[in-house]
Image: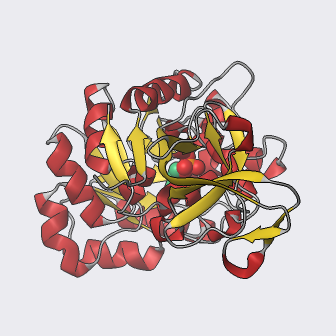
Amino acid sequence: MSLHPRARIHLDNIVANWRTIGSLTADSETGAVVKANAYGHGVAEVGLTLHRAGCRTFFVAYVEEGAQLREAIGADAEIIVFNGAQHEDRTIVQDAALVPVMNSIEALEDWLSYNRTEPYAVHIDTGMNRLGVRPADVPRMFDLVRGTPLSHVMSHLVDSDDPQCVLNTRQCYTFGDLILPLTRVRSSLANTGGCFLGQMYGFDITRPGIGLYGGGPTPPEGTILRPGMTLEAPILTVQTAGPDETVGYGATRELRHETLLATVALGYGDGFPRHASNRGFACLGGIRCPIMGRVSMDLITIDVSAASDLAKPGAFAQFIGPEAPLEEQARCAGTVGYELVTGLGRRVRRLYD
Ligand SMILES: *Cc1c(COP(=O)(O)O)cnc(C)c1O
């Protein structure tokens, strides 16, 4: 039997996190962001599980992601597509009953020039300068949307990771003021970090993503999120090496003394970042085992000297999970949890419990 890296997906934890985050803005509906294959956790499985738990508004980035989700969850939910839709997406938008977001006044004009009956959403830019109708164009937007089935209006926080940042309250008030005339349109502002800022940011519905999967900014005191996945790699070989020998490509790690090394099946070919070379870690039975030398395409070598009893071929070392917190591993690789989980490739087998 060949040994592969695997990600055990904890659907129960994802539901628990969805409820926990939802409780922070109890007066708002809690949506779920499941773009990029539910941040690498599987859009069909996560979507269906959250739908069963009561989630009725989902957010994706692409119409294809929306269609895949629709197939999994059925008709009874709204699916909003952040990146919008083009003319050629008309069939998929209608067949999968998707709600595309208009991200500029031009996109809105274009959409309304050929479609005045299907629901759609509008993004208003309150400071990101990335996507959205500019505040100066909002009066014109109101003229355009009159008499059309605008179903959702949203904006996005620039720096919700930092609860002290003054931009948060500024964006919150700006958005609230701008949408005041849209009394019958549902509104959203808060991603995971925004949910952590409290009810004022909740508007009608929230848009948590990374927090559902156990990552993101530090939650408020007393709020505990659980890992959405456990990423594990099987040990292929165990051997001793050193002193005065090196490990891996480029001889970037010198061994000062005799060291017990295990080589596992996981590498940058699976999406595990090469930047974790000599910096990241694995866990064996809760014991930290540092990455030794470079992460290569299919293999990583770790120092298992402190966990010699458990270091046997076929045993699994944990790289993300309860013992190896996502954001801590990401920091070691000079990145964020978002990039780590969305980057995991298809060679990593997803298992659902
Ligand atoms: C990805 C995304 C979210 C979710 O953000 P998290 O930080 O993962 O909670 C919310 N809103 C928009 C517009 C997004 O693009």
> Can you tell which quarter of the image residue 100 is in?
bottom left
Question: Is residue 65 positioned above or below 14 on the image?
Answer: below
Percent from the top left, x then y, of residue 220? 72, 27
Q: Residue at x 61, y 35 (%)?
A: 195
Q: Nearer the viewer, residue 49 or 271?
A: 271
Question: Is residue 121 positioned above or below 283 on the image?
Answer: below
Percent from the top left, x then y, of residue 245? 79, 69
Question: Is residue 334 positioned above or below 12 on the image?
Answer: below
Percent from the top left, x then y, of residue 141? 46, 66
130 sits left or right of 233 in the view: right
Percent from the top left, x then y, of residue 265? 48, 58
**Would you say residue 1 is visible in this rendering?**
yes
Q: Nearer the viewer, residue 347 or 142?
A: 347
349 sits left or right of 19 in the view: left
Q: Residue at x 69, y 57 (%)?
A: 158
> Can you tell which quarter of the image residue 32 is in?
top left
312 sits left or right of 251 in the view: left
19 sits left or right of 351 in the view: right
Figure quadrant of the C terminus: top left
